[in-house]
Amino acid sequence: MVARRVKRGRPRVLSLATPGPDPEGMDTRVAEHIEWMRSRNYSDATLTNRAAYLRRFLAWCGDRGLTRPSEVTKPILERYQRYLYHYRRADGRPVSFRSQVTHFTAVRSFFRFLARTNCLPSNPATDIELPKVERRLPRAVLSAAEAERVLAQPDLQDLLGLRDRAILETLYSTGIRRMELVHLGVFDVDSERGTLMVRQGKGKKDRLIPIGERALAWISKYLAEVRPRFAVEPDSHHLFLGSWGEPLSVSWLTDRVRDYVSRAELGKSGSCHLFRHTMATLMLEGGADIRHIQAMLGHADIKTTQLYTQVSIQRLKAIHSATHPGAKLDRKEQEDVGEV
């Protein structure tokens, strides 16, 4: 029997920033900042992203001979803002305003940390105004019929297809994030109560949410017929596994779901978040309260959830038809329009 190489558990963030030889240099201070965040229980994803944004800032400073935080002034930070605004990716696309804000927020938090720990006498980023971020609607949302077409794409004669059908049903039923799905454990699904426990979701928050009977049925089939064929000892107890017994990766899941959406030939693109948008929109159109949608999605701010009220057009359309005096076309007008 060939030994299987299996990755276990969530990858631990080890070294995101390395101190430099200068105890007051940029590298050293960034390493201290990241370690401070780690000690305050920030998530691995936040630490990884924050380190990446600060590395870009350090590279920009290095190109201009700035090696210590004490050399950075407000005008210099404003120059960095302009750099982000004018920066173009390899394909020529600019950095979105949302991404610009995310990048500069990391820099601002870094200097706030230095000021609070008395590494700097003041914070040069305090009075810098960030650009406004537009609240964009989801690019695509599936109708119930379109969602069913995507769900029907996996080959149910294949073990991987059975697993993928269970994955798609879970995404559609619960609207959980892709990271939350890959970290689901076998014991996080309670078939008897019809619930799913999301552990350490965004912001390291747990939440208990309902999951539909159909999704539970496919998960049960997967657990009975597929997972035992994939699992190897010692079992990681992740719910969904790869064919070699390894937990799924976020990038793999994204590509897999996107492929099924593409195969459905709907004229729409998307991946895991497409099902999240679809679940929220269809529940709202079915009469669900916005607070219940907020609980399902795990949004900290109701304003984020209210975005879906703009996508859920069916209820507004019905009210428009019932109340607007010019919404309906009578028979005579149909004849007149036909003559034009």
Image (cartoon, rainbow, N blue to C red):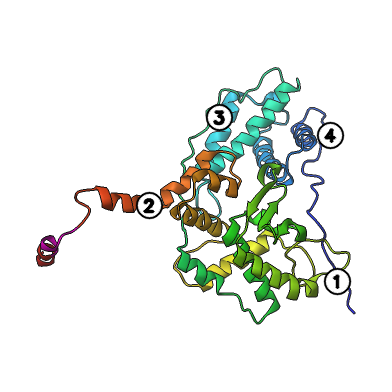
Side of 137 relative to 70 (left or right): left
The 10 Å Cα crowd at callout 4, few under 14, some 14 to 19, many 20 or more, is few
Residue where numbered disc 4 is placed: 21
Residue type of the residue flagged with mark 2: Arg
Asked if the magenta segment contains residue 78, the reply would be: no
Of pointers 3 and 1, the one earlier in the residue sequence = 1
Q: Which region of the structure is painted magenta? A: 329-334
Residue where numbered disc 2 is placed: 315
Residue type of the residue flagged with mark 3: Glu
Residue type of the residue flagged with mark 1: Arg
Residue type of the residue flagged with mark 4: Pro
- Disc 3 versus disc 4: distance between alpha carbons? 28 Å
Residue at 33% x, 53% y: name it.
Answer: 317
Quarter residue 7 falls in: bottom right
Residue where numbered disc 3 is placed: 78
- Disc 2 versus disc 3: distance between alpha carbons? 45 Å
- Disc 3 versus disc 1: distance between alpha carbons? 52 Å
Q: Which mark is residue 4?
A: 1
